[in-house]
Image (tube, grey):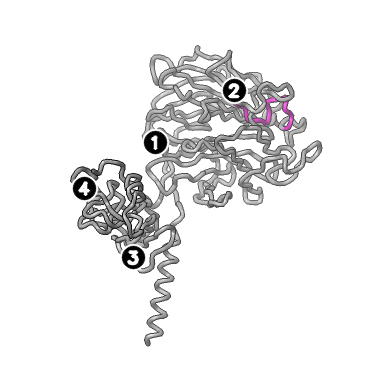
């Protein structure tokens, strides 16, 4: 019987380890936020609790409060906007110093069918813009009615980025995306705080050159309908709408010098489309994710990286969708330079935009008239902290697994754990519905400090009689002796002590 019991115990331990390794993947649902809109194509915040909705065909900007209740009309541009198909009022961006200067920027199709980027200013009433404050920054001729792009956004550098489609038709017949002397099919970057009506940032990749327009930040886009910056890292994510087969997500890390070429029309996604006059493949910057139309895709909707506080399990995840497929999908870095993708939620199609409020909580926009708020279906976010007696305590859960330096500690399955060696500790905890990982604590075990602990609450001295995590060295504290365990107290021990505690101990 003993071998059988031993085998059962071994299987139990292995099963526990496997369970501990299996974190519940993020899971979301969408809650209706407002369903009384016309053709919304974007939702934005200006740094306060209000949300601003861009209506494509009504050509106006409307305000909702944090509960989704209609507040009023912020700006009506219907007299200057041509709508229909891919035309209309398409983009909005608030100046980084909007709270003090009141400036905001819009992207629309004018009555001649061309793209306009213009600046407006709020009036004395914070819920009403001044319709007479318009200053046109850019007017870009559109040869066809489709592929207008439309998204604009301020980057972490304070410059305004403008996503331009290739001018339309199909297949970019005039090869505008690869033409450095047209703004179509490009990502533009301009300085709206200098110049008249704007200046070229000196750090733009083609600044001062004559063979490429200086506004160009990147080339080779087909129709970057939606792009966004990670509000924490500054990384740029672009959803570039494909032709007939491939949809793509492009990525540019923060700090890039610009000058990327995302390949269209030489490539659609990762696949050759029209190689006439193209460079070798190594010349181009390929997408981090592609989707084939055989999956039910037809038009990618670039999204955002979640950086809200309400759902920590979603932090750092990029969310996006497709207009036809409708599923909410994610990309998460795999730690090896690639990404792990998941399909989280079947929304039913018509997703045209993602946005976030002042708290970083995410919203999904459908041009069928609805806006939804994204929520985590299992909002369980356990944490660990010092108990003050030399042990670490975890939040209430039903099952616990402890890790040191990313390795599971066999047999430690209680809510409290006492470290016996220095390392980085965390736990994975289940509440019976999902398993989440806690914060990590750097724990130092160091003998020879007689009755005192480190001043940091996360550290523990195994030789101390009491560890409340608050002991601070002062004149009543005896300095430690042989910290390096060399058998001799030397200046090396003193240097080590000063490095850890400073000079507050006499």
Q: Going 42% across and 75% down the picture, which residue do you hit?
A: 11
Question: 135 above or below 188?
Answer: above
Q: Going 47% across and 36% down the picture, which residue do you hit?
A: 231
Q: Secondary structure at mark 2?
A: loop
Of the numbered discs 2 and 1, the one sitting upstream in the chain is 2
Left or right of residue 450, residue 214 in this image: right
> What quarter of the picture does the N terminus occupy?
bottom left
CA separation, marks 2 and 4?
57 Å
How packed mark 4 is, by other alpha carbons closer than 10 Å (few <14, some 14-19, many 20 or more), is some
Mark nearer the viewer, 3 or 1: 3
Q: Give the labeled residue for mark 3.
A: 413
How packed mark 1 is, by other alpha carbons closer than 10 Å (few <14, some 14-19, many 20 or more), is some
Of the numbered discs 1 and 4, the one sitting upstream in the chain is 1
Of the numbered discs 2 and 4, the one sitting upstream in the chain is 2
Q: Secondary structure at mark 1?
A: loop
Kindly identify which numbered label has been placed on residue 477. Answer: 4
Of the numbered discs 4 and 3, the one sitting upstream in the chain is 3
Q: Is residue 82 visible?
A: no
Q: Give how far across and how far down residue 392 sits, in percent.
A: 29, 56
The residue stretch that appears in magenta: 178-189
Q: Give the labeled residue for mark 1.
A: 359
Circles 1 and 4: CB atoms closer than 8 Å: no
Name the main secondary structure of what is drawn in magenta: loop
Of the numbered discs 3 and 1, the one sitting upstream in the chain is 1
Q: Give the labeled residue for mark 2.
A: 201
Q: Secondary structure at mark 3?
A: loop
How packed mark 2 is, by other alpha carbons closer than 10 Å (few <14, some 14-19, many 20 or more), is some
């Amino acid at each position: 019987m003993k071998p059988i019991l031993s085998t059962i115990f071994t299987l139990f331990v292995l099963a526990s380890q496997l369970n501990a390794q299996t974190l519940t993947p993020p899971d979301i649902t969408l809650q209706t936020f407002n369903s009384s809109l016309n053709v919304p194509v974007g939702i934005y915040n200006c740094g306060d609790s209000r949300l601003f909705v861009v209506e494509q065909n009504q050509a106006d900007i409307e305000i909702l409060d944090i509960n989704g209740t209609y507040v009023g009309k912020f700006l009506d541009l219907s007299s200057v906007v041509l709508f229909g198909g891919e035309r209309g009022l398409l983009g909005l961006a608030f100046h980084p110093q909007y709270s003090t200067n009141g400036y905001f920027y819009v992207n629309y199709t004018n009555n001649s069918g061309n793209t306009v980027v213009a600046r407006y200013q709020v009036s004395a009433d914070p819920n009403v813009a001044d319709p007479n404050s318009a200053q046109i920054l850019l007017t870009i001729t559109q040869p066809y009615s489709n592929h207008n792009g439309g998204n604009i956004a301020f980057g972490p550098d304070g410059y305004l980025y403008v996503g331009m489609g290739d001018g339309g038709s199909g297949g970019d017949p005039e090869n505008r995306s690869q033409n450095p002397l047209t703004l179509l099919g490009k990502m533009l970057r301009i300085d709206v705080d200098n110049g008249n009506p704007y200046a070229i940032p000196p750090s733009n990749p083609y600044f001062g050159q004559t063979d490429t327009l200086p506004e160009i930040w990147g080339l080779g886009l087909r129709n970057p309908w939606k792009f966004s910056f990670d509000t924490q890292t500054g990384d740029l994510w672009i959803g570039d709408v494909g032709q007939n087969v491939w949809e793509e997500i492009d990525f540019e890390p923060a700090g890039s010098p610009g000058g990327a070429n995302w390949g269209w029309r030489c490539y659609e996604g990762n696949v050759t489309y029209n190689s006439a006059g193209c460079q070798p493949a190594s010349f181009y910057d390929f997408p981090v994710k592609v989707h084939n139309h055989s999956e039910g895709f037809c038009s990618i909707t670039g999204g955002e990286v979640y950086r809200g506080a309400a759902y920590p399990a979603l932090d750092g995840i990029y969310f996006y969708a497709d207009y036809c497929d409708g599923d909410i999908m994610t990309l998460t870095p795999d730690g090896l330079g690639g990404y792990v993708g998941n399909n989280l939620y079947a929304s039913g199609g018509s997703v045209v935009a993602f946005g976030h409020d002042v708290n970083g909580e995410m919203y999904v926009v459908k041009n069928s008239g609805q806006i939804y708020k994204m929520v985590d279906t299992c909002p369980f976010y356990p944490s660990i902290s010092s108990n003050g007696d030399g042990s670490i305590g975890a939040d209430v859960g039903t099952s616990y697994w402890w890790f040191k330096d990313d390795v599971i500690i066999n047999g430690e399955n209680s809510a409290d754990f006492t470290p016996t060696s220095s390392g980085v500790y965390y736990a994975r905890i289940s509440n019976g519905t999902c398993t989440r990982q806690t914060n990590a604590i750097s724990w130092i075990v160091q003998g020879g400090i007689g009755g005192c602990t480190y001043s940091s609450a996360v550290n523990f001295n195994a030789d101390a009689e009491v560890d409340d995590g608050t002991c601070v060295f002062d004149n009543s504290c005896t300095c430690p002796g042989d910290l390096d365990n060399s058998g001799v107290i030397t200046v090396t021990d003193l240097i080590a002590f000063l490095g850890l505690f400073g000079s507050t101990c006499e």
